[in-house]
Amino acid sequence: MTEPPLWQLRSRKLSLDRPLLMGVLNVTPDSFSDGGLFVDTDAALAHARRLIAAGADIIDVGGESTRPGARPVDTDTELRRVLPVVEALADETVVSIDTRKAAVARAAVAAGAEIINDVAAGADPEMLDVMAESSAGVVLMHMKGTPQTMQNDPRYDDVVSEVRDFLVRRAAEAEARGVAARSIVIDPGIGFGKTGEHNLELLHRLGELVATGYPVLIGTSRKAFLGRITGIEDPRRRDIATAATTALAVAAGAAVVRVHDVETSRQAAQVAWAVARMRI
């Protein structure tokens, strides 16, 4: 019997024999869906524990909003937001640090984070070295431009092939710098420098990313293109739409889904996985 693939993290391994659920924990005042709700450490920890109880395998802690148009924050501010939460959760669950800054990634790993989730795919000149030295699990995400510019008329000749080739190239660069291949997960960056049509094309042809051999993470949760499809303006009411994309992504081979509402997407993922594998 073939052994299931494993995601190598800093101090443990996660089996990819089923889809993993990454719960979103934004400790920011300005995130698009839940900005300001969890800036208080106690509130953030209480929410993280609700996500864990609902079935989250990973808690992704972010201290800088990367919504379209968001302004960057300085390193000290980001560290002040995330470190108390990372430290408190590290003994309870697998913690991921969502950051573009090598200094934040380094400090968060020292505080117990197992995964570095970098929406800039190592754009910080020191980030790939931090990833290699820490032996952390790694998520490399595609973003066209920056949060300030990414939605200014993004264009591609073929969004899927361009995103795929970028991610494979960045993964190869990470490996050349010492990051273990088994530690790398790739993320096409739904909503990060893409139109709604680009997002749909990436989901429709997700198998082309899965075929790279790197596990694929998909993050569609509550995003604007779902609102345009459904007519729902409030991001917090888009969890059913999110669950639909979760099911489609899992059926196409996604290994990790990043969501705000873990319970709804957990059920969608379980059913999609059972159908795809044809087993209970």
Image (cartoon, rainbow, N blue to C red):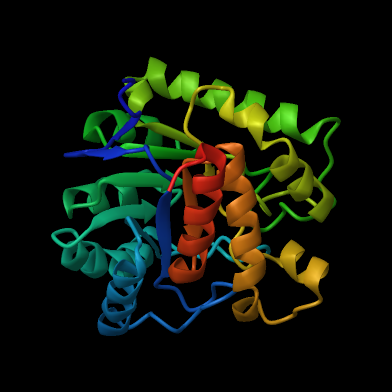
Q: Residue at x 48, y 63 (%)?
A: 267
| Residue 276, image quadrant | top right
State whether residue 195 is above or below residue 63: above
Tell me the quarter of the image containing the N terminus: top left
State whether residue 256 is above or below residue 85: above
Residue toward you, 72 or 48? 48
State whether residue 160 is above or below residue 231: above
State whether residue 144 is above or below residue 96: above
Q: Is residue 218 visible?
A: no
Asked whether, in this view, residue 128 is left or right of residue 9, the answer is: right
Where is residue 229 drawn, in percent x and y?
81, 66
| Residue 22, image quadrant | bottom left
- Residue reaching furthest to the top: 176
Where is residue 265 drawn, in percent x and y?
51, 63
Where is residue 235 drawn, in percent x and y?
64, 76
Asked whether, in this view, residue 6 is left or right of residue 277, the answer is: left
| Residue 239, image quadrant | bottom right
Q: Residue at x 73, y 65 (%)?
A: 226
Q: Is residue 192 visible?
A: yes
Where is residue 141 drawn, in percent x and y?
54, 41
- Residue reaching furthest to the left: 91
Q: Residue at x 56, y 53 (%)?
A: 219
